[in-house]
Image (spheres, rainbow, N blue to C red):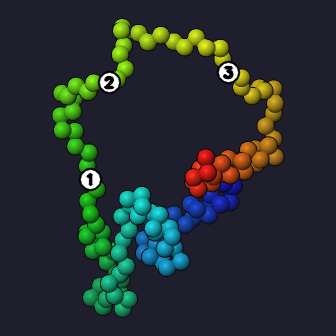
Amino acid sequence: MDEEKIAQLKHFVDECKSNPSIINDPSLAFFKNYLKSLGAWIPQKPKSSVPDESNNGTVDIEEDYAEAPKPKKYEDNDSEDELIESDIELDGDIVEPDNDPPQKMGDPSVEVTEESRDAAQMSKAKAMDAIFEGRL
């Protein structure tokens, strides 16, 4: 991603932090669904669009967060005492190193230019898109 897009994304995240109800905008439904698929908790829409007169026209966000499900904590369950058997058999305390010849790497004398960096980023983005779409 180029720096301008990253800056825009940071700005969007800051806006979401300051006003979490932004995520309930219908045009952002795809993003909200993505966040939910990752297990994120999304604040509910305010129950009423009419300002509450009891608190000077402000909506109390704390009420929405109070109803949020508590994240599950990792429970150890005394797993330190349990022995887990491995499929790998080690005859000693030392693992022998690989004696394979080193693999061929890039040319260290080549200087990276802005154009080559951009081309690499584009290739990487295409590869990531292909992986995301299942085209391996």
Q: Residues within 10 Å of mark 3 (few under 14, many from 20)?
A: few
- Which mark sits nearer the N-terminus, 1 or 2? 1
Q: Amino acid at mark 3?
A: Gln
Spatial separation of the CA atoms under disc 1 and disc 2: 28 Å
Q: Is residue 110 above or below residue 65?
A: above
Q: What residue does disc 1 label?
A: 72
Residue tagged by mark 3? 103
Q: Nearer the viewer, residue 21 or 102?
A: 102
65 sits left or right of 12 in the view: left
User: Which residue sits at x=38%, y=89%?
Assistant: 49
Coordinates of residue 54 in the picture (x, y in percent): 27, 88
Residue located at (27% from left, 74% from top): 63
Q: Residue at x 18, y 38 (%)?
A: 77
Q: Amino acid at mark 1?
A: Lys
Element assignment for label 3: loop
In the displayed structure image, the side of residue 122 where residue 32 appears, left or right: left
Q: Quadrant of the N terminus?
A: bottom right
